[in-house]
Amino acid sequence: MTTPARIPGRRFLHSPGPTHLPDEVLDAMHRQPVDLADPRLADTIADSEAGLKRLVGTADGEVFMYTANGHGAWEVVIENLLAPGAAVLIPGTGHFSDSWALQCEALGRRVVRTPWREGLPIDAAEVEALLREDRRHEIVAVFAVHTDTASSVTSDLDALRRAIDAAGHPALLVVDAVATLGALPIAMDAQRFDLVVGASQKGLMLPPGLGFVAVGPRAHAVSQANPAPRFYWDWGRRAGEQPYRKFCGTPPLNLLFGLRAGLDLLFREGLDAVHTRHRQLARAVHAAVQAWSAEGEVGFFCRDAAARSVSVTAVTIGGGHDPEALRRVARERFQVSIAGGLGPLAGRVFRIGHLGDLNPAMVLGALGGVEAAMLSLGIRHGRDGVRRAVEQLAAD
Ligand SMILES: *Cc1c(COP(=O)(O)O)cnc(C)c1O
């Protein structure tokens, strides 16, 4: 095979993870590791833990990091909170809630589901009804995917919290915020989440490879009472200050250097400003998709405008067109990488990621590249997409 020619300029990365890496993160990672007793490593870990606690909004919770992707962090939650045979309620949000449920079942746990309503967020009333039916309180926890990256739908976690309270059920509320941290506010203590799950390669602007959980006191107590054997994933073994213990072996030093730099960028910009920027960029993307869907073969997958994610937008594509062909042309000809459909949405949608280290010009470039790709493939769409996005940005 011949090596492809060098691509002039930059290729725009608009998948919803991995996301674009800021130069500050790349620079921080581009260095020799240090020995494990070097105090610089302990400092980096301490700063990262403090930064993650601030990011998820917890003073009471404790952060545990793992050399793992998001699925690894899911397994941390399962192994620590649920004994084999124990039950968990997973409200349907799409591919990611389905995948987490399958992982629970593969590990011998019981899953109670609410059905996934395509294009719609979690139905809190249904969750409440299921919890009321569980009179013996066998359900240990509710595992909720905040933004399902496959369907680009964000659910209302406060409504979910109220539903659990209204049912008078002691189930823990566990939140997968992998696709929302660094894009939407999360206030773990104030919103009374018992555990928050995150991963490095989305709003944290890092390469993949670092997963983490922020564990509140109630989740801690449940894990301590869980007799299931476990080792690598056991956060109980990660107590103490020794980096080697904290990571059950060698820490991913260079990812940690990058994490500290990425968190520093978020705090220097200011979390409020970061969240405002994400809302504005999302509004620009949504304006473009709205215009594209005015005529032709593309449209929003999310049917509830209020639940559209600020991180990613799934766009349906009809008329027999293959989203994978669109991705190829967008990537290879116009240098814009977008994502495809996952699970039941494979072949039905493409997805534009708009989270992480992005600005208006990058988002406009991505929308222009997607529009050019649709045009060159003869995918019918309203032609005002980029113009509407420009107008939205100018008005915001
Ligand atoms: C990406 C993602 C995951 C899984 O992360 P991996 O690193 O791909 O294992 C889990 N949950 C959500 C909401 C995600 O967006």
Image (tube, rainbow, N blue to C red):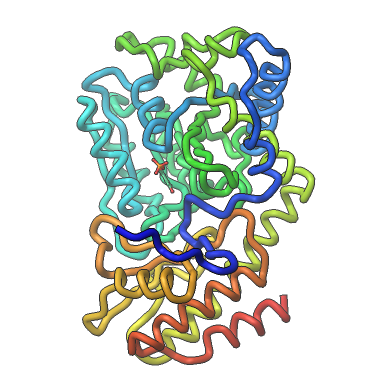
Q: What is the x, y in percent for residue 248?
A: 47, 13
Dividing the picture into quadrants, the one containing residue 128 is: top left
Q: Quadrant of ligand 1?
A: top left
The answer to whether 115 appears left or right of 140 in the picture is left
Residue ID at (40%, 19%): 233
Point out the residue furthest to the front here. 2
Residue ID at (27%, 28%): 87
The answer to whether 156 appears left or right of 300 in the picture is right
Return the residue nearer the eye: 123 or 359: 359
> Compared to 5, does 396 lie above or below?
below
Residue 223: tell me if it is visible.
Answer: yes
Residue ID at (26%, 52%): 115
Q: What is the x, y in percent for residue 365?
A: 58, 74
The answer to whether 12 appears left or right of 270 in the picture is left
> Compared to 114, does 352 lie above or below?
below
For the C terminus, the quadrant is bottom right
Return the residue nearer the eye: 368 or 119: 368
Residue 190: tell me if it is visible.
Answer: no
